[in-house]
Image: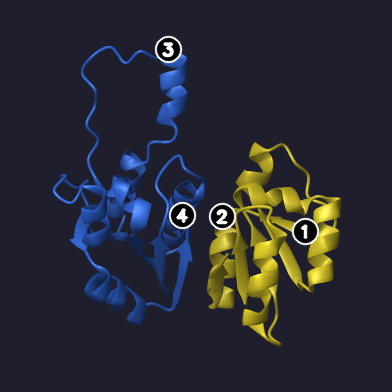
Chain colours: A blue, B yellow
Amino acid sequence: MAAITITLLSGAVENEAADFALRFVNRALAKGHQVNLFLFGNASYLANREVPYQGDKGITPDLAAYMDTFRLADRLEALARSGAVVHTCHTTEYARGTEGCPYLDGVDRGNVGVSLMKFLITSDVAFTIG
Amino acid sequence: MLYLLSAPDLGRLDEALPLSGDNDKDLLLFSDAVYLSQGPGMTKLRDLGFDNVYAEKKAVEDRELEAAEGCEVVDMDEVVDLVLDHQKIVNI
């Protein structure tokens, strides 16, 4: 078993990096590896609970279903339940005005100096994506 | 060394390739970078000196592509193995 750290730089929708990273985490966990996921920069947007709009969405059900495929909250929580350690960078959250927003279950507030450093020095392999 | 490339931008590779020095140079294409798995792209990648070129299966299938000879299509289980085998990963 290996320990792997992924630093994810991108949020959902802007590109496919977040989807790629979560699929990687899923398969790495399935193979018995330990996985740390550090949400940095725009990836910190993935850390927070969703806030559903209560009014008329103004989009068709088909469009909503398509857009739902980009939403990663449920997948991220499932990976955390399966053992992925997920920390976010509170400084990049601060810069985006989201630092006080509630986290998804299994996501913890973190930082570069402690969280990411601890991930890196305890990992066999580390890489950045995004 | 395993390079990860997400966009079909060969300029990024030019800048990053010296990082691997004399070590093996392998490349994993994902996202839009899998367009480089086609014939003309593979010719350019071979010219750049890559030992092995891989393309992520889902990205290839989503775009209804068929990788050219010399490009191995790999699923995510194999991507995990590639990352662990290489140890040194550079995202460009």
Q: Indicate the amino acid at tag 2.
A: Met
> Residue sitting at 25 percent across and 54 percent down?
A95
Chain of the residue under the numbered disc 1 shown in the image: B
Is residue A33 visible in the rendered image? The answer is no
Which residue in the protein does label 4 denote? Answer: A21
Q: Secondary structure at mark 3?
A: loop
Chain of the residue under the numbered disc 2 shown in the image: B
Which residue in the protein does label 2 denote? Answer: B76
> Residue sitting at 46 percent across and 54 percent down?
A21
- Dot placed on the residue nearer the N-terminal end, 2 or 1: 1
- Dot placed on the residue nearer the N-terminal end, 4 or 3: 4
Q: Secondary structure at mark 4?
A: helix
Query: Mark 4 against mark 3, which lies toward the viewer?
Result: 3
Which residue in the protein does label 1 denote? Answer: B71
Q: Real-space Cα distance between discs 3 and 1?
A: 40 Å
Q: Real-space Cα distance between discs 2 and 1?
A: 16 Å
Q: Secondary structure at mark 1?
A: strand
> Residue sitting at 59 percent across and 76 percent down?
B86
Taking the image as shown, residue B5 lies to the left or right of residue B70, namely: left
